Amino acid sequence: MRRQRVTVLAGGVGGGRFACGVRDLFADQDADLRIVVNTGDDMWFAGLRVCPDLDSVMYALAGVNDSERGWGRAGESERVSAEMAAFGMDTSWFTLGDLDLGTHIARSALLRSGTTLTEATQRLSRRWELGATVLPVTDAEVPTLVDVELDGHPARIHFEEWWVRHRAAIPTNGFVFEDAAAAGISAAAAEAIRDADIVLIAPSNPIVSIAPMLAIPGVRESIGASRGRVIGVAPIIGGHAVRGMAEQCCAVVGVPATAQGVGLYYGARSAGGILDGWMVDTVDADAIGPLAMGGIHARSVPLWMRDATTTRALAAAAVELASFRPLVEPAR
Ligand code: GDP
Ligand code: CA
């Protein structure tokens, strides 16, 4: 019998947590789990290729992430960063932990020797028993950029600079996936999405983690053509992003920061969107009716990923929703 294929589309921290829940759920079933990860946050920094979302997902699956701080490696130190600051480098706004730097240096060396990001990610992942294959959505460099005004002049800065250096505090009227059109989904990510029995959209930031993936040619097409049902999990509970700044990002693009708003923003797959089903929290059960009007089959369960048990239960509910029957059976 063919192994069950499960593919998750994920950003960094929310995506990594959810991916662990899905991995735990299928742990004793020998399923083929693939995590397709956003690369819009990736940047060249201090001469190194830094991939925040890929690393968050990899560290979470490996169990070496700093779960208290929410990002990076557990037991981290910052000796190298302190040295760089002593040399007067303008790099202190982006924390580079010593252990984390090992990842960036290894990856940069692989990329500079001609390895694709997909291959480099496989090489790095091999160190641990992740229980899943981590795949960048594309091998091309497609940074998410932010249009802002700096010192009275219009400027287009990298998303990480806006997010981390400026704490998302400078007003912006939009995110730009400038190089997306010329890029393409990687062959491995396309296959993972098209051949999946279930595609899950993690509770990740819809505007800066999921939308940058959807902007890459081939991603929407692969989701549209997937043989499996596509089920998403709302990253918003009761009108608030649980962790992170999804609310601010929604406001920038005019998407209501509600479970319903994000669900309708993704849209029904039957109408050119990406969702068959959508998980909302029990406090957002009112959204189920309006979502159904939009062609999205929604269900309410607790969406807080407090620990491994609740996260696994959330993954189980999402997988269960994938086997729903249409309310109206087709006429014979
Ligand atoms: P990032 O790339 O590191 O910002 O991480 P993601 O985009 O993958 O996830 C960040 C988003 O996940 C946050 O803005 C929240 O909206 C969402 N999130 C975080 N924790 C939870 C949780 O426990 N439950 C749900 N439903 N969403 C969460
Ligand atoms: Ca991210």
Image: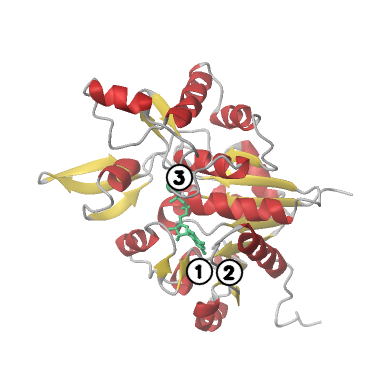
Label 3 beta carbon within 8 A of ligand 1: yes
- Badge 1 vs badge 2, beta-carbon distance below 8 Å: yes
The residue located at (39%, 60%) in the rendering is 246
- Give the image's coloring scheme: secondary structure
In the rendered structure, the answer to whether residue 316 lies left or right of residue 267 reads right
In the rendered structure, the answer to whether residue 173 lies left or right of residue 96 reads left
Q: Quadrant of residue 230?
A: bottom right
Residue at mark 1 to residue at mark 2: CA–CA distance: 7 Å
Residue at mark 3 to residue at mark 2: CA–CA distance: 27 Å
Name the foreground residue: 165 vs 83.
83
Q: Position of residue 37 (x, y in %)?
A: 54, 44
Label 2 beta carbon within 8 A of ligand 1: no
Q: Which mark is residue 71?
A: 3
The kind of residue on which mark 2 rests is: Trp
Secondary-structure class at tag 1: helix
From what the image shows, is residue 328 above or below residue 324?
below
Secondary-structure class at tag 3: loop
The residue located at (64%, 38%) in the rendering is 188
Q: Earlier in the sequence, mark 1 or mark 2?
A: 1
Secondary-structure class at tag 2: strand
Residue at mark 1 to residue at mark 3: CA–CA distance: 26 Å
Mark 1 — residue? Answer: 263
The kind of residue on which mark 3 rests is: Trp
Q: Quadrant of residue 131?
A: top right
From what the image shows, is residue 332 above or below residue 75?
below
Kindly tell me whether residue 155 is visible in this rendering.
yes
Mark 2 — residue? Answer: 278
Q: Dot 3: few (<14), some (14–19), or many (≥20) neighbours within 10 Å?
A: some
